[in-house]
Image: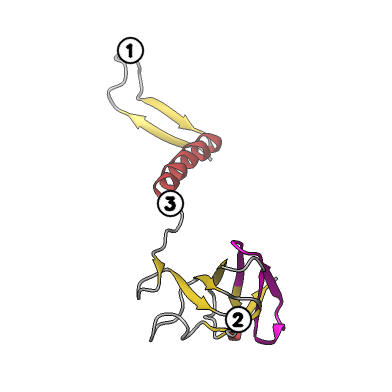
Amino acid sequence: SCFFFFFSGGPKWASRPLQVVWTAADMRFHLSLCALSFLGCCRAAKYLIGTQEHSGAYEVQFDEDKQTLDLSKDCYPGKACPPVIVMIGRQVGTIEVSNCHEGVMYTFINKGELDAGVVIQHEGGLYGAKGIPQFGVGTCFCYKENNLMCG
């Protein structure tokens, strides 16, 4: 379809107002420019990093004995863990994750002291596992019924 824009006050010699026609292709081009200008104001998510109540990237301390992560209570007391978990300390082996929140894409960052990687999985590993090397990043999605899907 075409879009018509009429301008009054055209040239005196014109017998009718000036008519501007935008084709569908023209309109797509102009809408694309508008969309790009909106994207220019948007930035990637930026999080406070630490162990404060409003940290969006929460640092969870691990040692050789800690092999579980409860996303409903292992972060700030009384609050669920945010979507970004920075694992610090001396974590090794497999970390069993429980109590994720449905619809959240979790990002796990292995900032451990040991050069060995870790494996993140839902309790029991039923829904896949994600290996994360030292200084690596892995993502898992919490599906319905709190099933953390990593893979």
Choose the circle earlier in sequence order: 1 or 3: 1
Q: Secondary structure at mark 3?
A: loop
Q: CA distance from mark 2 to mark 3?
A: 37 Å
Q: Secondary structure at mark 1?
A: loop
**Looking at this view, is 6 or 110 the one in front?**
110
Q: Callout 2, which amino acid?
A: Glu
The mark total stands at 3
Q: CA distance from mark 1 to mark 2?
A: 88 Å
Residue receiving disc 3: 43
Percent x, y of residue 114: 61, 68
Residue receiving disc 2: 64
47 lies left or right of 98: left
Q: Is residue 127 magenta?
A: yes
Residue receiving disc 1: 13
Identify which residue is drawn at 51% across, 82% down: 71
- In the image, residue 35 sits, relative to residue 19, either above or below, namely below
Identify which residue is drawn at 59% across, 61% down: 135
Q: Callout 3, which amino acid?
A: Arg
